[in-house]
Image (cartoon, rainbow, N blue to C red):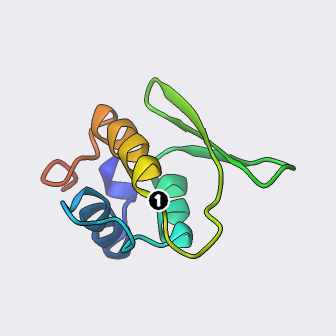
């Protein structure tokens, strides 16, 4: 699984799990990471459906470029449950 992540995806993963990541992770970077890690569907209403491991979630794009803290919390949980937490992605 983790072998699908490029160095850029790994950097985004590190930023997403960083303690002070709010305001530092851009939506486009997060979408790219989620596309590499799981299955994504861009819905007609602009939302992004993500299937990762046994979890499924739908995310609404932010108004600006960066992702809000609650979205990061939800994405972190999905990534960690699927084995994509930092330190577990070498492969």
Decide if residue 39 is on the left or right side of residue 72.
Answer: right
Q: Quadrant of the N terminus?
A: top left
Q: Quick one: which residue is furthest to the right in this view?
A: 44
Q: Quick one: which residue is furthest to the left in this view?
A: 87
Q: Secondary structure at mark 1?
A: loop
Task: Identify which residue is drawn at 46% across, 59% down.
Answer: 68
- 49 to 30, vertically: above or below: above
Task: Identify which residue is drawn at 18% across, 56% down.
Answer: 90
Query: Considering depth in this image, is 14 or 91 the residue closer to the camera?
Result: 14
Query: Considering depth in this image, is 91 or 34 the residue closer to the camera?
Result: 34
Q: Residue 22, percent across and down?
A: 35, 65
Query: Considering depth in this image, is 90 or 64 the residue closer to the camera?
Result: 64
**How many numbered callouts?**
1
Q: Quadrant of residue 27?
A: bottom right
Task: Identify which residue is drawn at 39% across, 72% down.
Answer: 23
Crowd around label 1: few <14 · some 14–19 · many ≥20 (10 Å): some
Residue that label 1 marks:
68
Q: Residue 20, percent across and down?
A: 22, 66
């Amino acid at each position: 699984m983790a072998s699908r992540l490029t160095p850029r995806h790994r950097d985004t993963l590190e930023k997403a799990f960083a303690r002070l990541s709010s305001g530092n992770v851009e939506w486009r970077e997060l979408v790219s990471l989620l596309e590499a890690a799981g299955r994504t569907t861009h819905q007609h209403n602009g939302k992004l459906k993500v299937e990762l491991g046994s979890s499924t979630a739908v995310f609404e794009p932010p108004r600006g470029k960066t992702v809000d803290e609650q979205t990061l919390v939800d994405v972190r949980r999905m990534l960690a449950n699927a084995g994509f937490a930092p330190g577990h992605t070498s492969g």
